Amino acid sequence: MIIEERILENVVVIDLKGKLTIGEGDELLRESINSLIQKGHNKLLLNLGEVPYVDSAGLGEIVRTYTTVKHQGGTLKLVNLTKRISDLLAITKLLAVFDTYESEAEAVSSFDS
């Protein structure tokens, strides 16, 4: 799992690349999110376009991330869901919990509305 962060307008885009699984991806994501929150960033966009696979631990970490950000007064949104991840969120009924977007531009502009 590779995690890259970049800022668009006032939103931190977190680009995930690789499998989000137990023991590797989930811990990296947790560390990255905790670091961003400590730095005062509270508008986060998780880009899942290059994540081919998410296991139960990875899914749990996305949910934990959402809860952590929300408790800090922030917002977490998802962009570029693959069909596999979209199906996983639909099956687990989590698609209703997250704000999801097809395009990064649409997702970033949604933070202002």
Image (cartoon, rainbow, N blue to C red):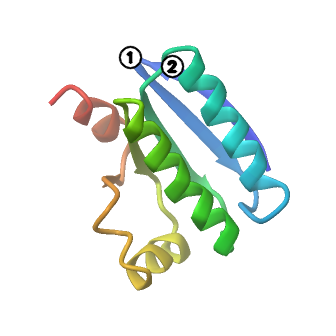
Q: Is residue 36 left or right of residue 103?
A: right
Residue 10 is marked as 1
Where 72 falls versus 107 (above or below)?
above
Residue 22 is marked as none
View extreme (bottom): residue: 91
Q: Secondary structure at mark 2?
A: strand
Where 69 falls versus 11 (above or below)?
below
Amino acid under disc 2: Ile
Task: Give 77 or 36, whichever is nearer the viewer.
Answer: 36
Q: Which residue is mark 2?
A: 7
Where 108 falls versus 91 (above or below)?
above
Residue at the spot 66% in from the left edge and 46% down from the top edge: 16
Task: Give 101 or 60, whichever is nearer the viewer.
Answer: 60
Q: Is residue 53 visible?
A: no
Amino acid under disc 1: Asn
For the C terminus, the image quarter is: top left
Q: Position of residue 11 (x, y in %)?
A: 41, 24
**Category of crowding for the residue at label 2, using alpha-carbon neighbours closer than 10 angstroms: few (below 14), some (14–19), many (at least 20):** few
Q: Secondary structure at mark 1?
A: loop
Residue at the spot 75% in from the left edge and 62% down from the top edge: 19
View extreme (front): residue: 71
Q: Is residue 49 visible?
A: yes
The image quadrant that residue 36 belongs to is top right
Residue at the spot 58% in from the left edge and 36% down from the top edge: 14
Q: Position of residue 88 (x, y in %)?
A: 50, 78
